[in-house]
Amino acid sequence: MNGLYLEDFFVGQRFSAGGLRIDADDIKRFAAEFDPQPFHLDEKAAAESFFGGLAASGWHTAAITMRLMVEGALPIAGGIIGAGGEELRWLRPVRPGDVLSVQTEVIEVIPAPPGKRFGRLKVRITTLNQKNEAVQVSVGHILAPMRSRTPPPDRGDLSDERSMGRTS
Amino acid sequence: MNGLYLEDFFVGQRFSAGGLRIDADDIKRFAAEFDPQPFHLDEKAAAESFFGGLAASGWHTAAITMRLMVEGALPIAGGIIGAGGEELRWLRPVRPGDVLSVQTEVIEVIPAPPGKRFGRLKVRITTLNQKNEAVQVSVGHILAPMRSRTPPPDRGDLSDERSMGRTS
């Protein structure tokens, strides 16, 4: 799908991407670098913890969610540039072997201020496991360029042949 | 510092941890796995992008923030278990060579419901670069056990000799 400009988005519009599996080794590797707590690192310690078994760091789930957005769950021209979010909740643990998908829904489209190129989208982002249970919900504020203020091709946007992995 | 229980926290209480340096290779490695967009992967593409140079994924900054919280910026008994947050904003790019620190401030202490062990803290979390500029701000909702409802040692909490990397 080609990348979309702000003018292409509307409230209620939905996108999705999925099929990313997370295994125990992924959980432990992420945790060792960013969230080194026993319930993310060691099955036995995790079994005795609040989580009752090995669980991914919430920030790992958030990072995988971003990956799936780049893979198609939010196809913005020039890529996905987040300004932040107003909500982020982890609803249930992500376990080894879970296969995650992401569904997005546009909930607000905010044009760029006068003279600026980037407006904003508010997007509800739901991360689901293979049982279709929500594991994370968030509302993201994402920049989106206005087509009407984007210079003609070959300058000013990010598209070029190095765009592997981009959404557009 | 030993881990603190809900009863030990008060509004206005502050903690900090710091000294985590992020280099271009770290930025690219995280991005390749979780946020594969040109402005996080390639200096030349980044120079031509919105960011004007290589910048870390916001989710990388968030993950490093968690690491620093585990290293001391929020010393909760049994570890840091986040339920989510109500705000997350990236204020400026994180660049290669930046050295990040985290400051936290308790803004609300919510006792556990009757019969439950875990209450909640609301914590303002600010991630700073080496120029003391805020790069990320968030408000996290973090579980904290009540001492008065915690079973005696040797059962029910997470502490044991595998606790390397924990905050308590």
Image (spheres, coloured by chain):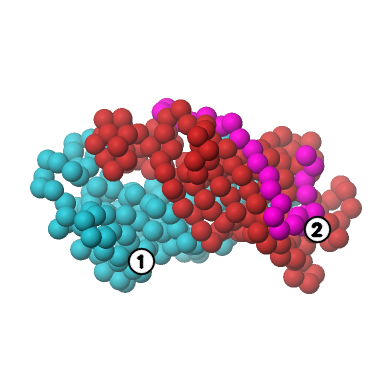
Chain colours: A cyan, B red
Task: Name the image quarter holding residue A120.
Answer: bottom left
Q: In this orientation, does residue A60 appear?
A: no
Residue A51 placed where, x, y %? Answer: 67, 54
Front disc: 1 or 2: 2
Amino acid tagged 1: Glu
Residue A28 placed where, x, y %? Answer: 58, 39
Q: Which residue is mark 2?
A: B7
Residue A10 placed where, x, y %? Answer: 26, 69
Residue B130, label in figure: none
Residue under the image location 42 percent in, 30 percent down? B96
Task: Name the image quarter holding residue A32.
Answer: top right
- Please tell me how crowded label 2 is: few (under 14), some (14-19), or many (20+) other residues with Cα within 10 Å: some
Task: Name the image quarter holding residue B12.
Answer: bottom right
Q: In this orientation, does residue B141 appear?
A: yes
B104 displayed left or right of B2: left
Image quadrant where one finds the N terminus of chain B: top right
Residue under the image location 63 percent in, 48 percent down? B104
Residue under the image location 53 percent in, 61 percent down? B86
B139 displayed left or right of A130: right
What span is colored magenta in the figure?
B1-26
- Residue farthest toward the left in the current orientation of the protein: A152
Q: Is the residue B36 above or below the residue A138 in the image? A: above
A122 displayed left or right of B22: left
Q: Which residue is mark 1?
A: A105
Residue under the image location 75 percent in, 66 percent down? B112
Amino acid tagged 2: Glu
A98 displayed left or right of A69: right
Measured in 3D between alpha carbons, the distance from the residue under mark 1 to the one under mark 2, in whole angstroms, is 40 Å
Residue A16 placed where, x, y %? Answer: 34, 59
Image quadrant where one finds the C terminus of chain B: top right
Would you say residue B22 sits in the magenta stretch? yes
Q: Is the residue B160 above or below the residue B119 in the image? A: above
